[in-house]
Image (cartoon, rainbow, N blue to C red):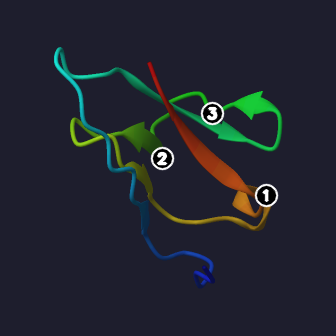
Amino acid sequence: VEIIEGLKAVLPCVTMGNPKPSVSWVKGETVVKETARIAVLDSGNLRIHNVQREDAGQYRCVAK
């Protein structure tokens, strides 16, 4: 996925389970921490506001 710097990105994560699994995101080998720009939504999707060059990388969602 390519996103233009300064725009918003939403990365999807589809999970199923009962109870609803908790979702975290990993960039490379590092757990993504929520900040003023980065949030894990209730849906499990990852939202990044004002995308920056340092946000580039491989992301994966992990459901437990």
Label 2: how many Cα within 10 Å (few below 14, some 14–19, many 20+):
few
Q: Is residue 38 above or below residue 11?
A: above
Q: Residue drawn at (39%, 50%), measured in percent from left and top? A: 13
Label drawn at residue 32:
3
Position of residue 56 measured from the top left corner of the image (x, y, whole percent): 75, 64
- Residue type (three-letter) at the residue carrying disc 3: Val
The answer to whether residue 42 is left or right of residue 57 is left
Which dot marks residue 37? 2
Write the residue at 70% across / 57% down: 55
Question: Mark 1 or mark 2: which comes first in sequence?
Answer: 2
**Sequence-earlier tag: 3 or 2:** 3
How far from the left and from the top, in percent, is residue 53?
77, 67
How far apart are labels 1 and 2 at the CA level?
13 Å
Q: Which mark is residue 54?
A: 1
- Answer left or right for 61 relative to 31: left
Name the residue rendered at 78%, 60% in the picture: 57
